[in-house]
């Protein structure tokens, strides 16, 4: 007996194809069939219908056949960087008109990221040109903002006197970092990296990637490039909202100000080195006093040394009682080192004078 698919079932199959075809350009038919328990022929009919509706592009034949989403909109514009250039005008004239049909919350995320990164190019890049690229498909929106300036990592390193560009990335990940405190709060890059599914910064010979709204980080070497490129990618079906991201890093006690941060400890490492020294800990701890709460994320860190743990969880915590540090994703070895540091006498108790009063 032939089973007929209901409209909701058909929509589910086609939504799955649209959401996954970019990552599976050659095997989308088989993974769709497996996902919904249908034949390959049935899955192929759904793909053919999407192609007929101009949602999917098919290239090649038989085994070499590949599938890809057809962009709803694709646009690139290059503009002169000058004080007269306004980021909100760039958004209204060059991006917003091409995002017809996008959900309001996703549109708000795109507006925030686009305007913040164009503003960054205008005020900080020291470049002469900025380009904005939009690719809008049924499944995803990608925004790319690229300038020809000095590069964000180099700018941060030199302006703040940091050790190197790697160190600049660690500071950017903490938030509240700006090279122009008179005009900026240093929140734009931090929050933009949290609102998109994927956020990538390319500058110099480094590539910094934030995934899933700030839960994963990756630092890679690359061929040196000129200026800074910001790549922002989000699902058209995302339920994320800008306000929920702001609230996540805010505290009611501080009128919802930016008082919390989430710091990837792995960024304090250089290559294969282990985190064992007090100097490494101090580099990680820099500017923590600007926050009330700091989440230290130990993902991708297997071990830490006694001195590293002691500097953070005994020495620093004792000297900064208003900064609450919470470790997450810690291995058993790391938890043991933290517990050992926390159980030791604090520096203040070690320095307390011994009473000369005697009891009868």
Image: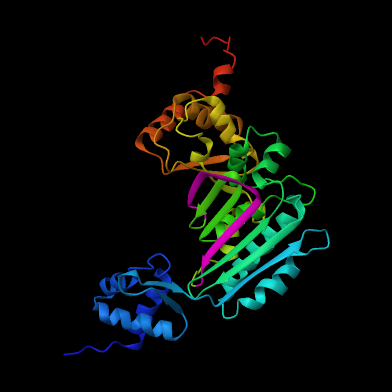
- In this picture the colour scheme is rainbow
Q: Which residue: 58% across, 23% down? A: 348
Q: Which residue: 55% across, 21% down? A: 349
Q: Is residue 9 left or right of residue 323?
A: left
Q: Quadrant of residue 337?
A: top left
Q: Which residue: 62% across, 40% down? A: 168
Q: Where is residue 139 in the image (x, y as percent from the top left)?
A: 48, 72
Q: Is residue 143 above or below residue 350?
A: below
Residue range of the region highlighted in magenta in the rendering: 214-236
Can residue 159 be seen here? The reply is yes
Q: Is residue 351 above or below residue 121?
A: above
Q: Which of 176 and 207 is in front in this view?
A: 207
Q: In which quarter of the image is the N terminus?
A: bottom left
**Is residue 187 within the magenta segment?**
no
Q: In which quarter of the image is residue 132?
A: bottom right
Q: In this view, does 180 lie to the left or right of 336?
A: right
Q: Where is residue 85 in the image (x, y as percent from the top left)?
A: 79, 63
């Amino acid at each position: 007996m032939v089973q007929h698919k209901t409209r909701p079932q058909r929509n589910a199959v086609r939504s799955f194809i649209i959401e996954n075809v970019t990552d599976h350009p050659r095997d989308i038919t088989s993974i769709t069939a497996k996902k919904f328990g249908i034949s390959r022929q049935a899955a192929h009919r759904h793909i053919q219908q999407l192609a007929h509706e101009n949602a999917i592009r098919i290239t090649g034949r038989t085994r070499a056949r590949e599938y890809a989403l057809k962009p709803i909109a694709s646009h690139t514009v290059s503009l002169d960087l000058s004080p007269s250039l306004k980021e909100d005008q760039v958004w209204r004239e060059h991006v917003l008109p091409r995002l017809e049909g996008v959900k309001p919350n996703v549109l708000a995320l795109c507006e925030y990221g686009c305007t913040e990164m164009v503003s960054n190019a205008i005020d900080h890049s020291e470049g002469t040109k900025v380009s904005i690229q939009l690719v809008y498909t049924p499944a995803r929106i990608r925004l790319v903002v690229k300038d020809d300036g000095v590069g964000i990592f180099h700018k941060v390193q030199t302006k703040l006197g940091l050790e190197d560009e790697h160190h600049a990335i660690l500071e950017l990940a903490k938030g509240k970092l700006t090279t122009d405190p008179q005009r900026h709060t240093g929140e734009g890059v931090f929050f933009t990296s949290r609102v998109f599914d994927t956020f990538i910064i390319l500058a110099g010979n480094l590539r910094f990637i934030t995934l899933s709204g700030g839960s994963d980080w990756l630092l890679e070497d690359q061929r040196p490039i000129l200026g800074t490129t910001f790549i922002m990618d989000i699902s058209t079906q995302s339920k994320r909202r800008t306000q929920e991201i702001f609230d996540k890093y805010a505290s009611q006690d501080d009128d919802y100000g930016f008082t919390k941060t989430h710091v990837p400890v792995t960024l304090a490492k250089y290559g294969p080195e282990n985190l064992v020294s007090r100097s490494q800990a101090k580099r990680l701890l820099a500017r923590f006093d600007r926050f009330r709460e700091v989440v230290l994320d130990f993902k991708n860190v297997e071990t830490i040394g006694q001195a590293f743990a002691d500097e953070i969880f005994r020495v620093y915590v004792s000297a900064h009682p208003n900064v609450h540090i919470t470790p997450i994703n810690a291995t058993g070895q790391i938890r043991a080192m933290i517990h050992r540091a926390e159980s030791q006498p604090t520096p203040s108790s070690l320095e307390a004078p011994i009473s000369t009063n005697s009891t009868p």
